[in-house]
Amino acid sequence: MGRWHDVLKVMTEDKTRTLSRVIVADRQVIVCQGIGSLVDQMEEVALGPFATDLKTLRRLLGQESGPVIVILGVRLADADLATSLKALHKDFPHVLVVVVAEESEFAFIRAAIKSGANSVCMMGQILESLPRILGKLVVGHSLVPTDILRRLTNDTSDALSRREHEILGLLVDGLTNFQISARLGLSENTVKYYLKAIYQKLGVNSRGGAIAKYVAGTY
């Protein structure tokens, strides 16, 4: 009996080692725990550790030797989404990334897809969508949920969103990033992200260029 127990133990350990490990990264531990509890119920993947900042995420990924999937929130404690995605693509190109965002953060979903995320998921649909997304990723297929594809198709991504119009108006009024963040209740990193999106949509690379287009009405 003891020998068969050892054989079964080895078989179980071998199966576990072949599974993709999932690391959940978000600045809020409670979000990591919530997503982690869902991942832990899946047989196709193995739940790994959590990370609340990019430094920790880098360290954890450096310790992994097998296939890894990162479920990434739009903000870490020390980095915004753009910074996190750039770091992951540069230093860990083999890692698959799924970006999760709230309904009000759809701009981040669009940006994640443009930045090469393997998949995206809205928090409101996570119970239904995430298991399907992870199931596809482990067999080499990326999946973008139908509702998100529909929004992306119908979305005029080059047009400024209501929030971007608001931030551009405050920019014209001469407010600094800090003042804009305080006025709108956003972090400075989030304001910087919105400004990058505004510059890209307007085809400019500076505050002055954005203001000039606003004043001229050519946007």
Image: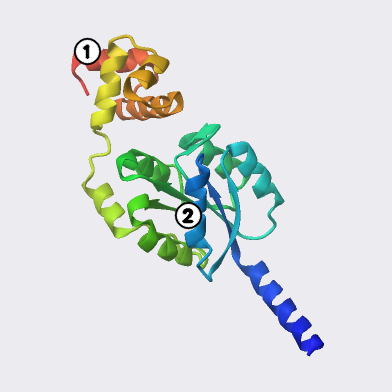
Which of disc 2 and disc 1 is earlier in sequence? 2
Secondary element at image label 1? helix
Q: Position of residue 173 (x, y in %)?
A: 28, 10
Q: Tell me which amino acid carries mark 2.
A: Ile
Q: Tell me which amino acid carries mark 1.
A: Val
* Residue bearing the label numbered 2: 35
Q: Judge by depth and name the residue closer to the eye, 187 or 34.
A: 34
Measure the alpha-carbon separation of dots 1 and 2. Answer: 44 Å
| Occupied quadrant, residue 16 | bottom right
Q: Residue furthest top?
A: 174
* Residue bearing the label numbered 1: 215
Q: Position of residue 142 (x, y in %)?
A: 44, 60
Residue 25 appearing in the image: yes
Quadrant location of the N terminus in the rendered image: bottom right
Residue 97 appearing in the image: no
Q: Reply above or below: 5 against 49.
A: below
